[in-house]
């Protein structure tokens, strides 16, 4: 018997994000976000794709909830579009937008699906970007007010609140690499953004508990980087990997969980900014109780020590594939070279490394001693398409999920307190700068007809959710 089993209490879910699935970009009183602006700027997304229509989930949410019920999911991670519920990012709420989410959450609960709500999955209201975006602390205060308003409006409907999704991507892909909205390429701005996203998390967590009481469950989703030294015997390469750990992971874990920025991080970034934006008291505001830490995992990196930036190509070889522009997201890491990793990859060019999620979860358990963990995203894009029978056979995705979930089970067996797993994604959707060319869904979306078709992976995942045991 090779089957790995999970307890009944283990949460099996699927995840999406508002801009990637909702569409209806100009309907229902929705305001604009930086992703509307970015995707409508020529040259920013593949083929000029935008989220204007996406999966039309705004009109098809009932069908999508029914699909999740059919799959037997225990939880659904969605995000609220900030500009849909508060068009200007400040001031009055848009009742039509709020109603969309109250209905959706009520339908989920009626179907026995626990709603996990991300407050910020990258769609900053455009007016806030015009005022400086995440480079200013006012944005963090605006976010906390929005979080408070959502806690008040949605309250007990929400099982778990996730403040921000992958602040690393928002700060470094958005403000340093220019690969994500708002498309800026200013290293100092990215560091400021990282701090203000930390602050936004802390202020929002406090605001939610202030509204709903201490029983409100609060989390954050971080895309933590698992980085290997190219030569494990090389002290220089080990040091390079450690630097990625500082700028990629501890820049968020430090303030949120330890109450400080690591010294090594300050050494790396000293020349880029005077760090005047970290004000006395900020670190105490950021470190709020985390009921569970959300971990998003896709691939690993391999790095080596180099002499300096190799004329613009720095970072472009890594499996992260940040090769879209001249700018690197890796602020402060001039002497770190990202190498292409060996072996099979997904359609993103990301290497397939189930061991990475095992290492990540067990390392977090060791560092934070039993901290509850939740895999809030894991999954893969593959070039799947319907066969002659109209079915979508996606054995690569089934294999990816099986091996990663098995690794999660091993991490649990070795003591990591992992409480749930959310596959990214429920539906094929708008994959940011890659547009609709990358399909992460366990459910196929035909973008001409908006028809949803369960892929083999959806049926496989449904069996797992039903039995708690990895199917053969
Ligand atoms: C995450 N990287 O994005 C996001 O949370 C999702 O919205 C997205 O669709 C999913 O993962 C798949 O990409 C990431 O380059 C984007 O390291 C880029 C990276 C990591 C995560």
Image (cartoon, rainbow, N blue to C red):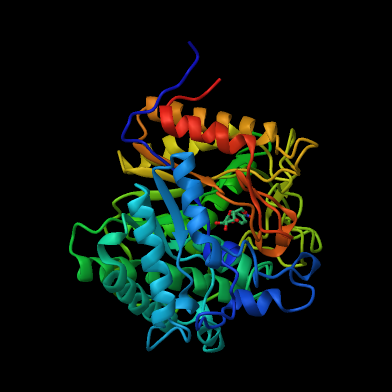
Q: Is residue 384 visible?
A: yes
State which image quarter holds ligand 1.
Answer: bottom right
Residue at the image position 57 percent from the left and 52 percent from the top: 244
Residue 127, x across and y down, in percent: 53, 87
Identify the image quadrant of residue 177: bottom right
Residue at the image position 50 percent from the left and 65 percent from the top: 121
Relative to residue 126, is residue 430 depicted above or below?
A: above
Residue 372, x across and y down, in percent: 32, 43
Identify the image quadrant of residue 216: bottom left
* Residue that extends furthest to the top in the rendered view of this protein: 1
Quick one: 1 or 226, which is closer to the camera? 1
Q: Is residue 444 left or right of residue 371?
A: right
Q: Is residue 395 left or right of residue 160?
A: right
Residue 96, x across and y down, in percent: 43, 79
Q: Is residue 282 visible?
A: no
Quick one: 49 or 300, which is closer to the camera? 49
Identify the image quadrant of residue 27: bottom right
Name the quadrant of the C terminus: top right
Q: Is residue 272 left or right of residue 165?
A: right
Number of dots carrying numbers = 0
Q: Is residue 181 left or right of residue 165?
A: right
Quick one: 278 or 162, which is closer to the camera? 162
Relative to residue 219, is residue 119 depicted above or below?
A: below
Residue 339, x across and y down, in percent: 73, 45
Relative to residue 471, is residue 214 depicted above or below?
A: below
Quick one: 243 or 92, which is closer to the camera? 92
């Amino acid at each position: 018997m090779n089957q790995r089993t999970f307890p009944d209490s283990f949460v099996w879910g699927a995840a999406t994000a508002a801009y990637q699935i909702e569409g209806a970009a100009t309907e229902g009183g929705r305001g604009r976000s930086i992703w509307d602006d970015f995707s409508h700027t020529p040259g920013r997304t593949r083929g000029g794709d935008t989220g204007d229509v996406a999966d039309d989930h705004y009109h098809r949410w009932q069908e999508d909830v029914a699909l999740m019920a059919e799959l037997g999911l225990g939880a659904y991670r969605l995000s609220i579009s900030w500009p849909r519920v508060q068009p200007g990012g400040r001031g009055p709420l848009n009742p039509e937008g709020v109603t969309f989410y109250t209905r959706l959450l009520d339908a989920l609960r009626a179907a026995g699906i626990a709603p996990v709500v991300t407050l910020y999955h990258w769609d900053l209201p455009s007016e806030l970007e015009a005022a400086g975006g995440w480079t200013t602390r006012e944005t963090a205060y605006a976010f906390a007010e929005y979080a408070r308003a959502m806690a008040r409006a949605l309250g007990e409907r929400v099982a778990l609140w996730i403040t921000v999704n992958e602040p690393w991507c928002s700060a470094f892909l958005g403000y340093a690499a220019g690969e994500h909205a708002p498309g800026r390429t200013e290293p100092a701005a990215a560091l400021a953004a990282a701090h203000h996203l930390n602050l936004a998390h802390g202020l929002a967590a406090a605001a939610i508990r202030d509204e709903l009481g201490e029983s409100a469950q609060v989390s954050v989703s971080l895309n933590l980087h698992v980085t290997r030294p190219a030569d494990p015997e090389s002290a220089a390469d080990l040091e390079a990997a450690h630097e990625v750990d500082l700028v990629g992971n501890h820049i968020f874990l430090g303030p949120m969980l330890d109450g400080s920025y690591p010294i090594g991080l300050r050494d790396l970034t000293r020349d880029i900014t005077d760090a005047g934006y970290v004000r006395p008291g900020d670190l105490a505001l950021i470190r709020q109780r985390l009921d569970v830490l959300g971990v998003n995992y896709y691939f690993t990196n391999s790095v080596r020590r180099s002499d300096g930036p190799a004329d613009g190509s720095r970072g472009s070889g890594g499996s992260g594939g940040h090769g879209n522009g001249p700018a690197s997201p890796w602020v402060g890491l001039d002497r770190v070279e990202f190498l292409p990793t060996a072996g099979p990859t997904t359609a993103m060019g990301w290497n397939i490394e189930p061991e990475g999620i095992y290492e990540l979860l067990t390392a977090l358990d060791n560092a934070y001693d039993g901290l509850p963990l939740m895999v809030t995203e894991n999954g893969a894009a593959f070039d799947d398409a319907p066969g002659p029978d109209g079915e979508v056979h996606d054995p690569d995705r089934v294999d990816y999920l099986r091996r990663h979930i098995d690794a999660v089970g091993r991490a649990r067996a070795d003591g990591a307190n992992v409480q749930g797993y959310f596959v990214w994604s429920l539906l094929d959707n708008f994959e940011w700068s890659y547009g609709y060319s990358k399909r992460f869904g366990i459910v196929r979306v035909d973008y001409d007809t908006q028809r949803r078709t369960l892929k083999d992976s959806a049926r496989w995942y449904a069996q797992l959710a039903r039995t708690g045991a990895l199917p053969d």
